[in-house]
């Protein structure tokens, strides 16, 4: 019995939803929306770590960027979602300020015993207050030593200048 070829099926209609593979170049607005969502995810992850919810922080870090990407793409087709995302992107400079200022405030809180620095991920830059104090003291010692060296060199030059002046006056 001969085997007859099967007629190819007509391809299924593509969904209206676009994906990263289907659309390699996304609009700048969509990229900005995705970055804003990722920023929120980073803040959420940091809060989770501070609360001791390490698995939640890991879940946000692992799945947040993919979710941000898909929500940003959804904003291309749904005006209500787009307006919410645009609100986030407009607050971008404030989000940047918050991301820059939060580690500073957390370090101050750790310095005064209000926050346990060991519960924070290293990328926050918040370190053991005792180590930070040692660093500052060491930097001050180095600066003092360099200044003292500069003063001694100037004093030596001044002494030489005075000898030259004294030799020309006589």
Image (cartoon, rainbow, N blue to C red):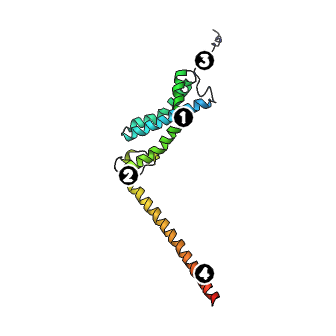
Q: Are marks 4 and 2 in contact (CB under 8 Å)?
A: no
Foreground tag (3 vs 2): 2
Look at mark 3 in the image and give the residue it sits on. 14
- The x and y percentages for residue 159 are 56, 81
Look at mark 4 in the image and give the residue it sits on. 161
Which is more toward the observer, 130 or 9? 130
Look at mark 1 in the image and give the residue it sits on. 35
Residue 111 bears which disc, if any?
2
Quarter of the figure with the N terminus: top right
Describe the element under mark 3 as helix, strand or loop. Answer: loop
Does label 1 or label 2 sit earlier along the sequence?
1
- The x and y percentages for residue 92 are 53, 36
Does label 3 or label 1 sit earlier along the sequence?
3
Does label 4 or label 2 sit earlier along the sequence?
2
Does label 3 or label 2 sit earlier along the sequence?
3
Mark 1 crowd level (few <14, some 14–19, many ≥20, 10 Å Cα): some
Describe the element under mark 4 as helix, strand or loop. Answer: helix
To which quarter of the image does residue 52 belong? Answer: top left
Residue 118 bears which disc, if any?
none
């Amino acid at each position: 019995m001969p085997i007859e070829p099967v007629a190819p099926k007509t391809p299924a209609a593509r969904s209206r939803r676009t994906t990263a593979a289907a659309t390699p170049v996304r609009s700048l607005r969509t990229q900005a929306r995705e970055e804003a969502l990722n920023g929120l995810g980073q803040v959420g992850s940091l809060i989770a770590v501070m609360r001791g919810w390490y698995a939640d922080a890991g879940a946000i870090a692992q799945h947040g960027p993919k979710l941000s990407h898909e929500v940003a793409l959804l904003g291309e087709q749904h005006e209500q979602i787009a307006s919410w995302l645009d609100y986030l992107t407009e607050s971008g400079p404030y989000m940047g300020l918050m991301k820059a200022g939060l580690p500073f405030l957390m370090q101050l809180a750790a310095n005064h015993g209000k926050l346990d620095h060991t519960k924070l991920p290293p990328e926050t830059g918040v370190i053991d207050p005792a180590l930070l104090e040692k660093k500052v003291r060491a930097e001050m010692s180095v600066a003092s030593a360099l200044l003292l060296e500069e003063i001694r060199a100037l004093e030596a030059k001044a002494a030489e200048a005075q000898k030259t002046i004294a030799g020309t006056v006589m």
